Image: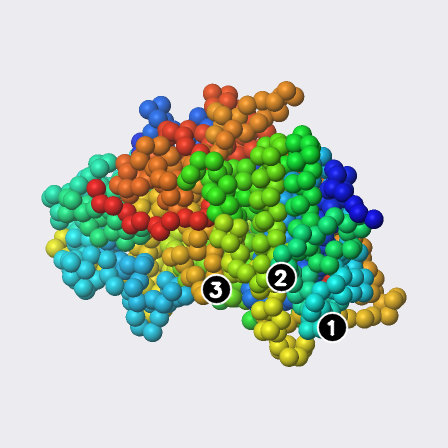
Amino acid sequence: MSVEWNQALLQKHLQAAVDLELWTIPFYMSAMYSLKDPSGMPYRLIQSVVYQEMLHVQLAANIANAFGLAPKINEPVYRGTSIPHLNFDLDTPNPTTFFSPYSAEIGPLDLERLNAFCLIEYPEWDTGGEPSPKANIEEYGSIGEFYTALAIGANAVVARDPDSLKGDVHQVNVFERFYSGFSEASSPIPGQPTTQAMCITEGGFAGLAQAMGLLAVITDQGEGQVQGEQAIPTVFQNTADDPQPDDSHYTKFKLLRNARPARDDAPRDHPWETYPLIHYPPDDPRAVEQREAQERLRHNFRKFRQALEQLFASGELPQSFGAEMATLGGNIRRCWQLGAVPTF
Amino acid sequence: MNDFVYRVHPAINIGRVGNSEEYLISPETPAGLPVAGSGETVGGLPIRPADGQTITSRDIRDRNGALKRQAARFRIYQYPRPAGPETYPYGGDAESPEGGGEGTEIVIGSKVGDRTVTDIVWTVHLANKKANGYVLENPNLAPDEQIIDGYDDGMTPPLRNLALGNDPDNARRLRQLVIDPGPRTISGRAREVVRFDRRTLASYWNGSQRKELPSYPKSYPDDSFPELYTPQGRIDTLGELRTDGKGRLHAIAAYGRACAFTGSTPLLQAVDNDGWFDDTGDGPVSAVLIFDDGSVQDVHGAWVVMTDPSYAPQTLNVISLWDDIYDSWVRKLGLAPQVFDGRFLADPKPPKKPYKPFFEDQLLPIFRAAALQRWNTNLPKMAVQAHDAVGRIGAHDDPADTILSGLGFIRNPNNRSEDNVGPPLMPLSLGDQGRAFMSVTLTQYFFLKQWDRGREGFRPGAVNLGPGEYLDRAVLTCCLGGRFSPGIDMTFIVRQPELYITDWRASGSGPFRIRPRTLDYESAQASQPFLSSGWIPLREGSGEGAEPGDTSKFMALPWHTDYNSCAMHPTSPNTSPPGQINAPTLYWSWPAQRPVAVYVADEVRLDREGGPVLGPQRFSVRGFGTESTNPAVQGRYQHYIDFVRNWFRVGTVIQGTAIDPGAGGPFPADLFLEVESRMDPPNPPPWPNNQVGPIPPYEAL
């Protein structure tokens, strides 16, 4: 049955985009915090990707709000090999043939996780065709195809009803100063960086152009690249704190995968050394401590999801947002220090 | 044998320049931390000499708008001579690590047994040796080396003012380049002003009486250089001495002047400007007690340092000067074996006990300092929220429930490669020369690690310091540590054990005292400079002690240029190793001491509920001559000379409770706002400032 674009279907896609971008953050962060040395290149490259995934959540939410949807921050599920919205069987060649084994479960930085990272960020080679809309998001063959469809849908919906896209609706703008090039490129006044580059400030077709710019940031930095393995365009590069600002997520992860030591028991003080997982009998006090740390993380992550939802429903930074976000990092690290896998 | 020992406290104290004849007493409570009896107003405020109360905003300037100088106040304390080896805190060891709270102040009129103190004779000798010192920007150092490395293996950095000779002990060079007014004595209760100027006779206590030195070879810049460029007036003094009604000493700094001896020498460098002098300085402080029976009691002396103004006196540094000095004494001088006996006592074998830091003194300062940085920096809102959460950590919180759980955001000083990693590792300030970012001291990190173990890892209370010990710590807590490139109050030499009286237990001096070189004033001759090039670190003989001027000579010359330029920097001139791309982003040098972006008290408005709403942030150093389109050089004068001309116009950031109605206050205790600025507005953008252009060199006028 053919499906046509409408506001509701577009909103469903935008919610899926937020879900997808959010899903990657605990997954990547957990692997990052399993590393003992925050000064090593593995840690720092993953961190730079995590920061951009946070940006992508913000951008997807800004587009969603412009189209009338205050996105929900749903609980991400990490199970088996189920990476959201990816059906590798639809790809030719199937990338799992070389990025295997992989796992979509929270875990330390190991080969299974690195393969999963590469699969998530695996670039789509443009086949030239336009994807048709799908009511079931899972039916897209790749994230690239999904974002391409989303862009087509946004254009179609605005073309039918320009009022379906409104400017200045609960827009969030916390990362802009990390992307000076984008601020300058988006400015209506040459040489004068705008302070609203990552927001949709206009309605109708002008707003649509802004939305397309935000989608391009997402796809050119990370998931859904449709031009093969490309450097990030200069205007979308992090200008503040990225060790390799021109490399896409896929390039960074592939580099890590290739540089990874052959054995998991990396020597002490090595940048790849991870905290060991330790299994205690259930009634051992250390097992109790592990469970407490996991529960603390789950609790704080729930609070954080609520705060994030509030942020995108209002455009105003909740009072405790910065603290709640930062606390999660400590909570994850604490789990690893105790030998437990973080749980969200 | 005398049952008591007598010590001057603070062991090291700080005076600060100002352009007013009037003065305040420099802070004697720790910046940013709670003070008993002060309500919500935290420590760090200077003190009014007239009534001993901490200042409010109207006290910062005199009626003509000039910035008041600050005096280092010294007192004498009596301690019972310990039966065994002395411990620190006095009476503190593994069994009672909190200390005994010992120490009784001795003033004129105090009874000691059956004797009465009838007078206190103080001797202070200030000097400024900066122009005869060694450069700080040592061209022989590799990018990852620190300033101290330039003194290793018998080496020294190049001298400043090499055009006047390459022998730092050449008599002519010493006479030309060392400002040496000679020693001064003062005694009694508030009866005289003794200046370190040319007209006032040099004098000292010779062991039995005060002796004048009419032939002392004083030297001031215009003795050797009749043609001087003096934008703020001649340097004709290094400050003055007074006593108060109890015979305590007030050592007051000079006027913040700088002058150039070649008349047209431009100020082009941040820290090493040949041809220039300033009127800061330092030197030993000694005292004797005179009793009514004619007997005399020697007192273990102290050291005074005269330096830059403090424009944010209540903003605590994450690593204060106290933290650096305490860390050195703990790890290198056996100060507290209950903390460190060759290694930190985290899990020692019995009978030794793990050391549990005291929350109020050894942890809270780190947390509070982090939160206070927001008032002097342009941190974005989300970062402010996170910093506030750090500041809210209390003694009753389970560390695992706090934002610092797992210490995931604390740069680990044991892993030096983390020196080159920026956010989210904290502190988010630039590090020492050779290190891109700053780390807490090893002792601070040990305390944090113990805390992170949970409630059983630390104790909620405070160390029970005696009043003199409290002063030692409080005054240094108000000063800058961590980033000695070179710093503001003192610099990298404070980490060197050979600077101090290392036999502090046997000598009875107590800890933290700079060893003064024994000076034979009887030998002073008018024809010869009295002081030598003096103490340098890492030398045989370094333990013989420091002369007057030997600590400040390692600071910037003049101080103004360093202060002006140390607003925001890329990690360069610190290291920026391959793969490190923090270079285009700007970070703060010394935000607690050198505010970068501030909120102005006059611009706070009230919302509908009557709550305060902050105005826009302003650069602390702003107005005509500071403008630039390049973020890397904003918030400072584009020509160094303009800061020499305008430094006293900079406003002061203080707590809302100390702001008078005339300045719009009082405000809630959680606001720290700029008052008494004589500068004009532009606004800084929020951090991160990046994508900056190349940093242009300073232009000569």
Where, by quadrant of the figure, is residue A112 drawn?
bottom right
Classify 10 Å Cα crowding around label 2: few (below 14), some (14-19), many (20 and above).
Answer: some
Numbered disc 1: secondary structure: loop
Q: Residue furthest bottom?
A: A262
Classify 10 Å Cα crowding around label 3: few (below 14), some (14-19), many (20 and above).
Answer: few
- What type is the residue that disc 3 sits on? Gly
* Residue B265 in picture, x, y percent from top left: 18, 47
Which-is-in-front pick, marks 3 and 2? 2
The tag on residue B675 is none
The residue located at (54%, 29%) in the rendering is B614
The residue located at (68%, 76%) in the rendering is A264
Which-is-in-front pick, marks 3 and 1? 1
Q: Which residue is identified by label 2? A: A125
Q: Nearer the viewer, residue A177 or B670?
A: A177
- What type is the residue that disc 2 sits on? Trp
- What type is the residue that disc 1 sits on? Pro
On screen, residue B499 above or below B77: below
The residue located at (36%, 67%) in the rendering is B142
The residue marked by circle 1 belongs to what chain? A
Q: Which residue is identified by label 3? A: B579
Type of colouring: rainbow
Numbered disc 2: secondary structure: loop
